Image (spheres, coloured by chain):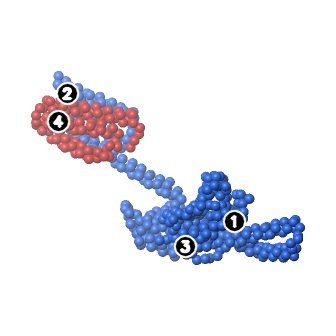
Amino acid sequence: MINENELVTLLLAVGALVFILSNGAGLRRLPMAPLFVSAYGVLVLGWCFTVLEGFFWDTALNYLEHACYAASSCLLALWCWLVFSNRPQCS
Amino acid sequence: MLMNLVAVFPCVSLGAMLLALAVLAVRWKHALRRSARLFLLGVLVLTLFHAASNVLEWANIATVLDLFEDYVELLLPVLWGCFVYVFLQGLSQHELRASEARYRSLTDDVLDTSAVAIQILDAQFRIVWINQASQSYFGLNRDECIGRDKRLLLHEKIKHAVENPEAFARQVTDAFDRHEPATFECHVLPGPTREERWLEYRGLPIPGGLYAGGRIEHYYDVTARKRAEQHREELLLKLETQNAELERFIYTVSHDLKTPLITIKGFLGILREELGEGIADVVEDALGRIDAASDKMMQLLNELLEMSRVGRVDVPWEDVPLADVVEEAVALARGSIDACGAEVHIDSGFPIVCGERPRLIEVFLNLIDNAAKYMGDQPRPRIEIGAETSDTNVVCYVGDNGIGIEPRFQGKVFELFEQLDPHQPGSGVGLALVKRIVEVHEGRVWVESEGPGCGTTVRFSLPARPA
């Protein structure tokens, strides 16, 4: 069963991902940019699994969805730690 | 088991977000711009909210958070995108400011402090920018110049700072019209707001970019070089004048001294006749010494007179076959050659040069005479005469296997009245005369000898005859 809210979230997430990737050159100036983009990529993957679990393998995909959320949060926290704890002030 | 794991994930997420928020709170101003930090804070708070909501859902605890969960999920990707957008905007502004700072530093700290006056013109020859040196060299005001047509400014103001203003303006505008590089010199006259200077103009068309079709003009301050050149010219002129005076003096002295000398010689002859045969030995000896001294003085004066004539008397140059010159010189020097018993070897292949034939004979004659005179007690005396030709000059040489010259004396042999062996006959004018003749023929002369007993070779160069 498809949830409209989840579908709209996924569309917005993919749109934001396209925007992020298309500005890859500028985003490279962001400290630890690969970690940051990975955090967002994993989050988008989680939203993908949310939508897909409405069609098949609901239990496994739900498990993967929450795993992705957790992984994304960990990567984001790690990024914050590295950028704000260890690096000097930048743009 | 699987359900338990699903419950653990939101807890992990919750913990990670709490840690991230704590880091952000403690090190708030440590990284990123303020607007980017605010959006990041939003991302962290919403992710925390999302994780907390999942935890509560797993625990079957219904709260007010459930009402906002859908909105949170919608907002989350938007906030991520906004964070990236704000970061990129900040980056652009930062780069713009950095670029402005670089440009300002380039103009204010580098180009504006340059000693070279720089003027940049656009395709319509309007002044885009001039540096401080441009202002001071021409007494201009940058604010009044920027945006104005250089051609108008040239006629209104710039050209009046320069000697020959019309010629200067024409040279500059011609360079504009031709769209080609141009280089010339101009003399800036002193004025109330400028100093006297000599400037070298170098204008180049700008090939591309914002000011394509325009020009960049440089004015290099060459005042020091110009003043040095003027000083050198003055010194040369002074030297030439002094040389001419010296030559006139030598000529006059040597010419005027000959007259009383001839009188002395004449009266010496009369005295001899009057005294007759029976004069005392001491008188005969005294008369002989006076006669010899008079002859020596006469020779000296004749040679000095000859030397002063070289280059002073304007004789037209002609094509002179050096082979004939050498042959004639050897014939004239036959007496000295026979006296020392030297064998003369003359190389073939003498070229034709342009010059004064009698003077060139004199050069070879002097050198052959000298070679014969300084042969010493060489058992097999030999004199070699030859020439080596290149594209630009001819190097002639007269070599011998005589007594040679110590290296420390080699520079002195061409000086006037310089005789390395005072017991040898001669006045010390011969090689000085050779040097003078060769220099008048735009050549140079030098001596080569490995030392006493090793022989000597005198070489002199003459310009090759143009083809």
The amino acid pointed to by label 2 is Val
In the drawing, what numbered circle is on residue B6?
2
Give the label, 1 or 2, closer to the camera: 1
Asked if the residue at tag 4 contacts the one at tag 1, i.e. Cβ–Cβ closer than 8 Å, the answer is no
Please give the name of the residue rendered at 14% of the width and 30% of the height, measured from the top-left corner. A60
**Image location (x, y in percent) of residue B448:** 60, 56
Give the label, 4 or 3, closer to the camera: 3
The chain ID associated with circle 1 is B
Dot 4 corresponds to which residue? A49
**Image location (x, y in percent) of residue B89:** 34, 48
Of residues B227 and B355, the one nearer the viewer is B355
Q: Label 1 vs label 3: CA separation?
A: 25 Å
Q: Is residue B185 left or right of residue B45?
A: right
SS assignment at label 1: loop
Can you tell which chain is drawn blue?
Answer: B
Dot 3 corresponds to which residue? B320
**Image location (x, y in percent) of residue B408:** 66, 53
Please give the name of the residue rendered at 32% of the width and 32% of the height, measured from the top-left corner. A78
Q: Earlier in the sequence, mark 1 or mark 2?
A: 2
The amino acid pointed to by label 3 is Val
Dot 1 corresponds to which residue? B429
Q: Label 1 vs label 4: CA separation?
A: 114 Å
SS assignment at label 4: helix
The amino acid pointed to by label 4 is Phe
